Image (tube, grey):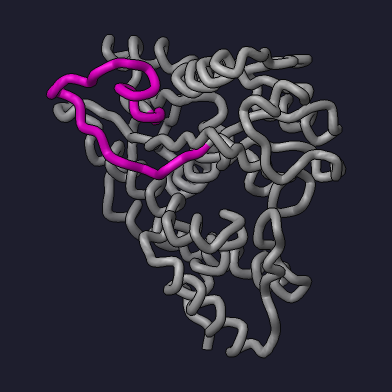
Amino acid sequence: MLNLYQLTTFVTVISEGSMTAAADKLFLTQPAVSQQIRNLEEELGVELLVRGVRQIKATPQGEILYEHSRKILHHVQQAEIAIKSMGAELKGDVFMGTLNSLGLHLMSPIISRLLRHNPDLMVKVDYQKGEELIQNFKSGKVDVLILPEANKEFHYEMDETVESKFLNKEEMWLVCSGKDSNVPQQLSIEELADHLIVQFTGEYPEFDRKVKEKMKATGKKYNVIFESSNVGTLKRVIETGIGLGFLPAHAVKKQVRSGRMNRIHVKDLSYEMDLVYYYKKNSDKKVLIETFYQALSQQEKG
């Protein structure tokens, strides 16, 4: 009989696009993940994965299992949130600050579920650049910050009054349209200069600095034909085949999995960051804030 552990592993492999990435997210070894998938395939008597060159994808049978498994895990999570919420006083308001690219994909699903079970709860979300959000957090205008690690990405050191909790690892992926078969599976930073670039601006300054530094060292320049700070707009532009672009992995995994986009591995660039949940230790909304954290961290594990 299938169990939630197997389904979680399978869904994570598909959404992450590889056994190794899934193992990292689930804090397992790669052989342990592979064995879980093999056990699942043996139990069902079908192959669930196409071990492709670019990334792992689901077979038709695997797609069916993936869609049903996501719904099952979603309902289990909803039940957990509802039950835990009953024991907590989720009343009043909480003001949260995050990047636009994180809010849509990370926060929106959890907020809608918590509001459904807690009618006396009011949530406000502020989408701005990281530096502006940090200033609002310092001045007390924002109760919670969800950002890449502030010290690394924004060169800001939180003081001893701030509690910080790890949420998830995040990467920046170079992607192109799934229709563009002429783009190689791997590129170097220098080779990027030979392609049209759709540029994501404003939200990850340290990543931008690192890419510019590496490009400058090659003696070449980006050929940027479009730029925006809106992830949704950039995804639509990239899917048309106009150019390549770096976007947060969580924002494009669904498109890569479905084949609407392809991930291109950059040989001489690797960038990983911690997503962190920040709040004031002496906050009078601690029950509410910590409930949000538990809900978000459970979503990320799923």
Q: Quadrant of residue 168?
A: top left
The reply to whether the magenta stretch includes residue 121 is no
- Residue 168 lies within the magenta run: yes
Q: Is residue 292 left or right of residue 299?
A: left
Tell me the residue at 48%/65% (across/down). Answer: 76
Q: Residue at x 44, y 20 (%)?
A: 206
Left or right: residue 91 compared with residue 54: left
Total count of labels = 0
Q: Residue at x 51, y 16 (%)?
A: 213
Q: Nearer the viewer, residue 230 or 120?
A: 230
In this orientation, does residue 93 appear?
A: no
Residue in the image at 78% along x and 15% along y: 225
- 271 or 289, which lies in front? 271
In the image, residue 300 above or below residue 95:
below
- Is residue 174 something one can see in this rendering? yes
Find residue 262 and report its horizontal and vertical position in percent.
73, 45
Residue 268 found in image quarter: top right
Which of the two residues, 238 or 216, is positioned nearer the viewer here?
A: 216
Q: Position of residue 253 (x, y in %)?
A: 63, 47
User: What segment carries the magenta color?
Assistant: 146-171
Question: Horizontally, is 289 left or right of 275 in the view?
Answer: left
Position in image of residue 135 (x %, y %): 33, 10
Residue 197 location (% of width, % of height)? 73, 22
